[in-house]
Amino acid sequence: MTSRGSVERVALVGVLGNVLLVVLKLFAGLAGRSSAMVSDAFHSFSDVLATLVAYLGATFSEAPEDKSHPYGHEQFETIAAVFIGLTLLATGGAVCYHGAVEVWREFHFLLTPDVASAERHVPTALPLIAAIVSIVAKEGMFWYTIFYANKLNSAAFRADAWHHRTDAFSSIGSLVGIAGARMGFPILDPLASIVISGFILWIALKVLSGSASQMVDTACDDAAETKMRELILSIPGVDRLDLVRTRKFGSRVFVETEIAVDGNMSLFEAHAVARDVHEAVEKQFPIVKHVMVHVNPTQASDTDAALSSARFVVDRDDKNDRL
């Protein structure tokens, strides 16, 4: 399956799966007299919007470079991830507020039992079944989406996957609350909602912090840069590595490096070494979008440089002989 096909399939699974869950939860919540399940249905509806945003972000990010965007459009994925993170933040805040209101309401019922008996509605078994179906479905959608998000290196779909998991958490809260209400402990419903909102807010901050690191040109981790250094130094003709600088750009990475070659090399030979470095890094690290190589000269009297230069000439001669 191509990259474009993967994006479309993941988006289709997310949208259709969430639409079916919205219908199921809304029906179960209304027919089964469960306000928690009705709230859960609206949470699933936010997942539909999140998947559409992730799809648009992944689609726009694949647009080729143009005059106005010479470095590409990968940042659209980051923007989509930020939007999803903000949606999660708002959802977590709303769930926490609703849970706090319901906790206060339950305390009011404890003080006024006559009012409680008239206003309380015990949920039926239908919302319980809907909650179990939702937990299984959303966990499955999480693993499906995160698999392709990692395969495509898509920040937007990675954020969407975590959105699926927060919906699973929300359904767990609904399950506990509905079961508690049926067993005579209705306050468990709002208390569970408050606990679940904490998970949602934590994931929202995780998504937003990851997106922010991509928007402020954060460097790759030390392990990745160490591997790049080792690769560059292994290229014939490279005497010294003066600089390696990386910066994230959406789901891709730009690399700037300064290498030192024998100062007595011709311009053509030095350019060939720089080209080999450029091609090796982009081949070894598919996440790299472009490598900028600057060449510095080393002194001919430098023993290491002379040995490297001799090795480089021999390698070039061998290649020419094979040709």
Image: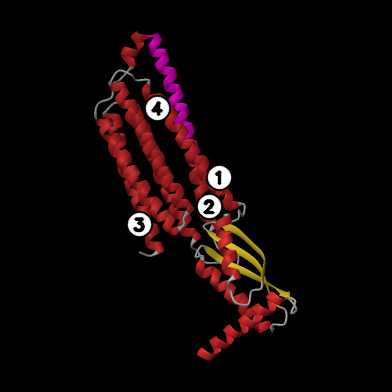
Name the residue located 32 percent from the left edge and 30 percent from the top edge.
Answer: 175
| Sequence-first disc among 2 and 3 | 3
Please report contact status of discs 2 and 3: CB closer than 8 Å, yes or no. no
Determine the CA span between mark 2 and mark 1: 11 Å
Relative to 79, 117 lies left or right: left
**Segment tinted magenta in the rendering:** 89-112
| Sequence-first disc among 2 and 4 | 2
In this view, the mark in front (1 or 3): 1
Describe the element under mark 1 as helix, strand or loop.
helix
- Label at residue 9: 3
Vertical side of 170 occupied by 210: above or below: below
Please report contact status of discs 4 and 3: CB closer than 8 Å, yes or no. no
Describe the element under mark 2 as helix, strand or loop.
helix
Residue 61 forms part of the magenta stretch: no
Determine the CA span between mark 4 and mark 1: 26 Å
Name the residue located 35 percent from the left edge and 11 percent from the top edge.
Answer: 115
Residue that mark 1 sits on = 209
Name the residue located 58 percent from the left edge and 48 percent from the top edge.
Answer: 212
In this view, the mark in front (2 or 1): 1
Q: Quadrant of residue 320?
A: bottom right
Residue 209 in percent (x, y) is at: 55, 45
- Label at residue 78: 2
Please report contact status of discs 1 and 3: CB closer than 8 Å, yes or no. no
Of the pair 278 and 212, the residue shown nearer to us: 278
- Label at residue 192: 4
Amino acid at circle 1:
Ser
